[in-house]
Structure formats: C-alpha cells, structure tokens
Amino acid sequence: MLSYLVFALITAGIYGILALSLNLIWGAAGMVNLGLVGFFAVGAYASALLTTLTGMPIWLGLICSMAVGALVGVAATSATLRLRGDYLAIVTLGFAEVVRLVALNERWLTKGADGISGIPRPFAGLLNPAQFQIFYMVLVLAIMIVAFLLLRRIDRSPFGRVLKAIREDQELASFAGKRIVRFKMIAFALSAALAGLAGGLYAHFQSYISPDHFQSLLTIYIFLAVTAGGVGRPAGAVLGAFLVVGFLEGARFIAHIIPGISAVQAASVREMMVGLALILILQFRAQGVLPEQRLPAPKR
C-alpha cells in the first residue's frame, strides 16, 4: 500500500510540473496548447536516448530534456504564434500527434513500438526498489516546488503582468508598446522546457518508454487539473494536479467494483468519469478551487 501511495505521489508531482507548464502558457498568456504531451514526449525521448546511447549522466540528461523541449517548442511554434484560439489549439494538437508518429515509425532512433528500455535510474545500484521510490518521490516533489516558486515569481513580475495583458487584450498590449510575439515565444519556450523536464523525470522513473505512453489523453488530464485547481494561478495548477491524480486513482477502484463489466469496460467507465468531472467543474466551478488573484498594480 505504501509503495502504491508513493507511486501516486510521484505521478502527482510529474502532473504538477506539467500543470505548471500549461498554466504558464494557457492561464497566464491565454494560448491554448493541446500539444503538451508532445513536448512531454520530446523531453522523455531526449533524456532516454542521451543517457542510454552516450552514457550521459542522468542529471545532465534532465537538463538536456529541458533544453531540447524549449528548442522544439520554439521551432514548432515560431510559425504559429500569430494564430489565436481554435487555430493554435488545432496546430499544437497536430504537433503532438506528429511527435508520437515519429516515435512510432523512426525505429532507427526510437525503436518504434518496442520502445526504449533500460533507461538508467538514479542511484538504482545503491537503493532497493522501495528506497528508490521514496528517493524519487522526494526528488520529483522538490523539483515541482522549485518550479512552482519560480513560476509564482514570474506570475507576479512585470513579465507575468505583460503576459496577462496579452491574454486579456492583445491589441491593447501591442498598442502599449509590448512586443507580443517575443513575449509569447519566451512563454512558450519556458512552458515547453518544463514539459520536457517532466518527460525526462517520467522516463527515468519508468525506465521504459514507448509511443503508447504519450497519448493525447494525458493533455486532457492536465487541462482538467488546471481547470479544477484554478486557471491563471500556479498554486491552483499544483493543487489541481494532486486532485486529478487522486480522482483518477479513486476512479480506478470505483470502476472495478461495478458488477458485470470487463476490465476494458472498467477502463472506459473511468474515462467517462473523467469527462463527466470536467463537465461538472466547468458548469459549477469554472474558476477552480483557487481562483486567480487579481493583484493590485505596483506603486510607482
């Protein structure tokens, strides 16, 4: 039971980092990124390949997962930042699917559907499985807290206020002299770097990744987390991630106690419950558990 709880906390920590990433680009800047799982996959494959093929240290692989995520984010979005609303959402959704298909078909690099196994775990030779799980839980939660503090500082900085101005009225922000594309590019790069880091952490925890691990459903979970916690508030994103993981794990048991359904049907019931939860949140608590705070303008 303890091992299961630790596993859930590690998952919640990784989801928390992803939720912070989405909150920066969606909650603060107002850009809908449905390709979050694509950047997550890029970071996971980058760290997995670098550490397994070149023997690179794990900590350096995680840094590279952030750098590769940011670079791919900039490259993938440089031609789309002028798009708004539904168009940007569709393009980013397509990007995530392209990443998954590349991972599935480029066997020379990613081993296709077989996936990459033997991804090194930190201190795996020194710790038994239970000790490793606890160590990794502390590591993931510590990184999530650092990311939270960083993004909360950004949220309250002049840069964060410009992002919110762009979210509220892009034309007015441009009229005020703000370089819209530059701010959006920086926000997207930071968001993609965080998603890439989450992917690297996931790869080194699982020790095995394949294209099946990067389905678009993960993006829906993270959207549900940010919506439930509170769009536009880093604390809400983290809280929402833990609520969603708790809900998903709870739904796993509820689905299994329904009599007369198979395991496949139970999984479908679980996904239906996730969709129902999202609808109910949007209907009755659209601002989330922790609504966005409207901070007063700084005194001159």
Image: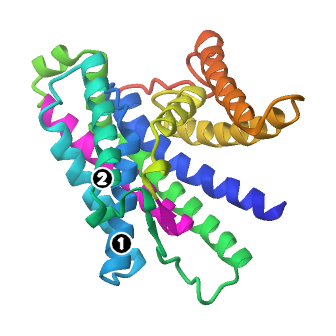
Residue at the image position 47 percent from the left and 45 percent from the top: 18
Q: Label 2's element?
A: helix
Rendering coords of residue 191 (x, y %): 34, 44
Left or right? Give the position of 216 relative to 171: right
Rendering coords of residue 255 (x, y %): 79, 33
Rendering coords of residue 53 (x, y %): 32, 79
Q: Is residue 185 magenta?
A: yes
Q: Which residues are magenta?
A: 180-209
Q: Who is closer to the viewer here, 243 or 175? A: 243
Residue at the image position 28 percent from the left and 50 percent from the top: 102
Q: Which residue is mark 2?
A: 105
Which quadrant, please, contains the C terminus? top left
Q: Disc 2 or 1, which lies upstream in sequence?
A: 1
For disc 2, the neighbor class at 10 Å (few under 14, some 14 to 19, many from 20) is some
Q: Who is closer to the viewer here, 28 or 120? A: 120
Rendering coords of residue 190 (x, y %): 30, 48
Q: Label 1's element?
A: helix
Above/below status of 190 relative to 80: below
Above/below status of 253 relative to 105: above
Left or right? Give the position of 16 relative to 151: right
The disc label shown at residue 61, or none: 1
Q: Who is closer to the viewer here, 26 or 6? A: 6
